[in-house]
Image (cartoon, grey):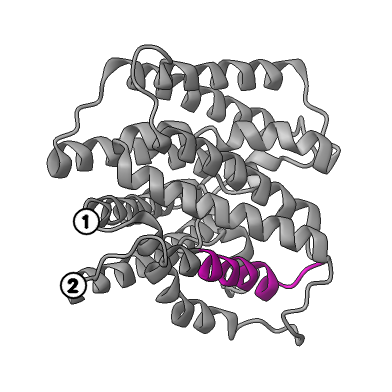
């Protein structure tokens, strides 16, 4: 029995999320020994050859000079903050807590789409945003647990990733994919390279190779996400993003001895439900821009570039 396009799309998205989760697990494992920014530096450095191969598909001639300098700089800053925040959070917090916080990205995209895209958000989606953000408070439970820098880093990563996603939507096709990919990579390389002067641990060759695996998994996940959205409807494919919490629970329990506590489970459930509701509302045509649906809900890092940008370079074969 042949699978429908939506089933294929959902399965591709689930596989992509599995690669992303493994990408994040390796970050956490290396983070027990090495500074997070050092891991990010080498992982992004080893991403360059892979991304260059993809960029060779760019049919548009030109240079790395942006056509929209201010927006590209702002997106670059946001992407660097998102990568740093994500890597640090995964290195220091339980996986499920990090994912629960990063899952606020579509909620934040909905808010940021108002000033940046001129989007009109109705009562239903505002209610979903408020309820979803209340889930973050349940996860963080101020006063009930000691808030760590990793929690702040995860929130900063979610906000920055949402901002970067909305900027891509605002720019549309007025900027070359090469510029949108390479500027964050160069910015990250400079920022994390400078951080090596503050904290550096000599890396074993096997651990250095694992940073290359991080780069490969990130790009592989992005490619699967592209194929998922081309195969199935966004309203079906997008919610599969949240399967990462299942990977987090399995990996966390098996590799790191992490147990999913009740507040994290409840808060994550509220955040996920709100995100799915927003995607569902957008899929009904309530919004012309559909920012949360089309932005691809994975939080951005330099080693896991935005699939929406890569999609412009990846051939579409039917």
Q: Label 1 crowding class (10 Å Cα cut-off): few <14, some 14-19, many 20+?
A: some
Residue ID for mark 1: 33
**Would you say the residues marked 1 and 2 are in contact, meaning their CB atoms lie under 8 Å apart?**
no
| Figure disc tally | 2
Q: Which mark is residue 204?
A: 2
The kind of secondary structure element at disc 2 is: loop
What residue range appears in magenta? 174-191
In the displayed structure image, the side of residue 110 where residue 66 appears, left or right: right
Q: Is residue 219 above or below residue 271?
A: below
Q: Position of residue 220 (x, y in %)?
A: 40, 66
Please report the residue visible at 19 percent of the width from the left and 27 percent of the height from the top.
259
Q: Main secondary structure of the magenta part?
A: helix
Please report the residue visible at 45 percent of the width from the left and 62 percent of the height from the top.
195
Q: Position of residue 160 (x, y in %)?
A: 61, 45
Q: Which mark is residue 203?
A: none
In the displayed structure image, the side of residue 273 where residue 168 appears, left or right: right
Please say whether residue 99 is visible from this viewpoint: no
Q: Position of residue 315 (x, y in %)?
A: 59, 75
The stretch drawn in magenta includes residue 182: yes
Please say whether residue 158 is visible from this viewpoint: yes
Please report the residue visible at 26 percent of the width from the left and 68 percent of the height from the top.
210
The kind of secondary structure element at disc 1 is: loop
Q: Quadrant of residue 277?
A: top right
Q: Position of residue 25 (x, y in %)?
A: 27, 51
The stretch drawn in magenta includes residue 38: no
């Amino acid at each position: 029995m042949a699978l429908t396009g939506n089933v294929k799309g959902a399965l591709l998205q689930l596989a992509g999320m599995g690669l992303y989760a493994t990408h994040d697990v390796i970050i956490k494992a290396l983070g027990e020994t090495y500074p997070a920014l050092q891991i990010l530096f080498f992982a992004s450095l080893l991403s360059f050859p892979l991304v260059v191969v993809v960029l060779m598909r760019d049919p548009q001639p030109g240079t790395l000079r942006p056509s929209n300098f201010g927006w590209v700089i702002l997106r670059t800053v946001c992407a660097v903050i998102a990568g740093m925040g994500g890597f640090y959070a995964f290195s220091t917090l339980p996986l499920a807590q990090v994912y629960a916080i990063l899952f606020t990205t579509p909620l934040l995209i909905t808010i940021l789409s108002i000033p940046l895209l001129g989007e009109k958000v109705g009562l239903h989606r505002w209610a979903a945003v408020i309820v979803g953000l209340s889930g973050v408070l349940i996860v963080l439970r101020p006063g009930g647990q000691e808030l760590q820098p990793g929690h702040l880093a995860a929130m900063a990563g979610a906000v920055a990733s949402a901002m970067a996603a909305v900027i891509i939507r605002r720019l549309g096709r007025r900027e070359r994919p090469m510029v949108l990919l390479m500027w964050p990579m160069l910015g990250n390389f400079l920022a994390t390279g400078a951080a090596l002067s503050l904290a550096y641990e000599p890396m074993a060759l096997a651990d250095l190779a694992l940073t290359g695996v991080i780069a490969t998994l990130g790009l592989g996940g992005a490619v699967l996400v592209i194929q998922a959205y081309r195969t199935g409807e966004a309203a079906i494919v997008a919610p599969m993003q949240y399967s990462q919490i299942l990977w987090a629970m399995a990996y966390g329990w098996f590799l790191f001895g992490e147990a999913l506590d009740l507040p994290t489970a409840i808060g994550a459930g509220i955040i996920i439900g709100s995100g799915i509701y927003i995607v569902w509302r957008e899929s009904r045509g309530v919004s012309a821009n559909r920012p949360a649906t089309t932005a691809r809900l994975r939080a951005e890092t330099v080693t896991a570039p935005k699939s929406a940008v890569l999609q412009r370079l990846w051939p579409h074969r039917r």
